[in-house]
Image (cartoon, rainbow, N blue to C red):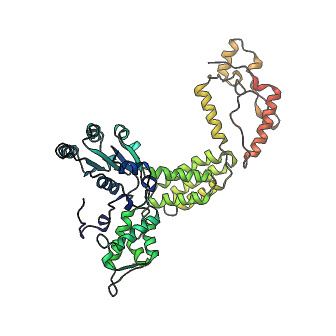
């Protein structure tokens, strides 16, 4: 852990940070005074779980913690390791503790890949202090790691590294003679380094690997390697967007997409749509969410939004990719720029709450089937109470009549878009109902 890095090692491995100050980004948890930094520097922690996108430094941070605290560093991988290997590492840690008084940090990458029994093996040894556990995962540990292990660990989320921070790492790699490429006399154009940093999408390892490829494959001119934007573009090629179809990126991005539509920001909605399509999200999942948003967020303010969303869904099924993204963009912009109303959705919520928590209401006698009316008549119900008024027989196809045994109001129309006209009609009808007293019909419990 303290030896000089081998020139045969990849540049990303040679440039791996050795101290907390060399770690790129993550200032939200590693800046001076932050909880994790204080815990590391005072050597006062037991178990940690780091989660975040690939290339953000989870393994590196675990190694730096071991170096900073003077601990032995042992690592396992959740894909390759088994229970026997876990027990062997723990036995070694116990021996070093008992004979030399040394602490061992057991780092397990991709801890979410361990099954329950594998994770459970760790628990008693963590509690007894045989090892100090650090786990790393790209998945949200609250959903993908067993609760007993989560409850015994402090959890810290690592973020994608900012472009400027990645540029700084690349510059350090170019000037570091011992570990980096300082002996190659590289002249790098600033736009080339920025391009590598932007295309790596916060993955420092990917950026360093692309830099190494660019430098090692570019012919030198009079002993100087010139790293231009063109060379950088060739070395990194297509941007790899950090996106897990079943993880946090999937849920966060679709959430941002729908909230951008709800917030009437077509530009933001189009960006999140583009990100999802670029990352390989199932377009049918996107179109289904558009249909939901059309009713939940636009609703009666523009009922045509639902038709546009459904048409986009069917158009995609008919066309497929890549052209199928066009109707998805059409629907996205339409919904984002449409007037908004959630009144029907909210009204249903209030009605559902009454059904689930309130008194169950019986269907009024005059609305029941003829067979049921006969039973009511036999029980002495009056003809007036049983008479149903056929709305189409009256002017404007409306006449005051109770349709609930109590005058409950769930739907409150808004004043956006077409719902203004709905509000006018409904206000008139409800006023008629109030004057007639039909809304005060007696109720029956069942």
User: From the image, which quarter does the N terminus lie in?
Assistant: bottom left
Residue at the farthest front position = 42
- For the question of whether residue 320 can be seen, the reply is no
> With 266 as the anchor, is 86 left or right in this view?
left
- In the foreground, 411 or 142: 142
> Could you say where residue 431 lies in the image, as x and y percent from the top left?
81, 33
> Could you say where residue 221 lies in the image, as x and y percent from the top left?
34, 86
- For the question of whether residue 4 can be seen, the reply is yes
- In the foreground, 383 or 159: 159
Q: Does residue 162 sit above or below 383 in this rendering?
A: below
- Which residue appears at 58% of the width and 58% of the height? 268
> Could you say where residue 140 lies in the image, as x and y percent from the top left?
41, 47
In the rendered image, which quarter is residue 437 located in?
top right
- In the foreground, 117 or 220: 220
Total labels: the figure holds 0
> Could you say where residue 401 lies in the image, as x and y percent from the top left?
76, 28
User: From the image, which quarter does the C terminus lie in?
Assistant: top right
In the rendered image, which quarter is residue 358 located in?
top right
């Amino acid at each position: 852990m303290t030896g000089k890095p081998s020139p045969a090692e990849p540049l990303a491995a040679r440039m791996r940070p050795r101290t907390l100050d060399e770690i790129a980004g993550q200032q939200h948890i590693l800046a001076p005074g932050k909880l994790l930094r204080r815990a590391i520097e005072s050597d006062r922690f037991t178990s940690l779980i780091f989660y975040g996108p690939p290339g953000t430094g989870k393994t590196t941070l675990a190694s730096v913690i071991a170096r900073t605290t003077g601990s032995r560093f042992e690592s396992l991988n959740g894909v390759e390791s088994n229970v026997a290997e876990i027990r062997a590492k723990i036995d070694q840690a116990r021996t070093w503790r008992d004979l030399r008084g040394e602490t061992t940090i057991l780092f397990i990458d991709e801890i979410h890949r361990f099954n329950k029994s594998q994770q459970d093996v760790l628990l008693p040894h963590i509690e007894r202090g045989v090892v100090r556990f650090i786990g790393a995962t790209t998945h949200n540990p609250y959903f993908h790691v067993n609760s007993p292990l989560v409850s015994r660990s402090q959890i810290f989320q690592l973020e994608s590294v900012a472009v400027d921070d990645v540029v700084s790492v690349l510059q350090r790699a170019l000037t570091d003679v011992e570990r980096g490429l300082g002996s190659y006399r590289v002249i790098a154009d600033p736009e080339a380094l920025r391009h590598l940093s932007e295309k790596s999408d916060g993955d420092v390892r990917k950026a360093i690997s692309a830099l190494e490829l660019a430098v090692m494959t570019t012919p030198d001119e009079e002993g100087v390697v010139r790293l231009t934007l063109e060379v950088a573009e060739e070395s990194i090629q297509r941007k790899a967007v950090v996106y897990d179809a079943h993880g946090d990126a999937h849920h966060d991005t679709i959430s941002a997409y729908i909230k951008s539509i709800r917030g009437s920001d077509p530009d933001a909605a189009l960006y999140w749509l583009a990100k999802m399509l670029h990352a390989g999200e199932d377009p049918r999942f996107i179109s289904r969410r558009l249909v939901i948003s059309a009713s939940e967020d636009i609703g009666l303010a523009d009922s045509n939004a639902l038709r546009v969303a459904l048409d986009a869904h069917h158009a995609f099924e008919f066309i497929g990719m890549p052209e199928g993204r066009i109707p998805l963009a059409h629907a996205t912009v339409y919904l984002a720029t449409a007037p908004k109303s959630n009144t029907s959705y909210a009204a249903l919520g209030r009605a559902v709450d009454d059904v689930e928590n309130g008194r169950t209401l019986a269907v009024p006698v005059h609305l029941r089937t003829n067979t049921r009316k006969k039973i009511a008549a036999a029980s002495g119900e009056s003809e007036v109470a049983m008479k149903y008024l056929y709305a189409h027989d009256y002017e404007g196809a409306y006449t005051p009549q109770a349709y609930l045994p109590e005058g409950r109001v769930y739907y409150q129309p808004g004043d956006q878009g077409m719902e203004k006209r709905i509000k006018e009609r409904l206000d008139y009808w409800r006023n008629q109902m109030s004057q007639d007293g039909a809304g005060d019909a007696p109720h029956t419990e069942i």
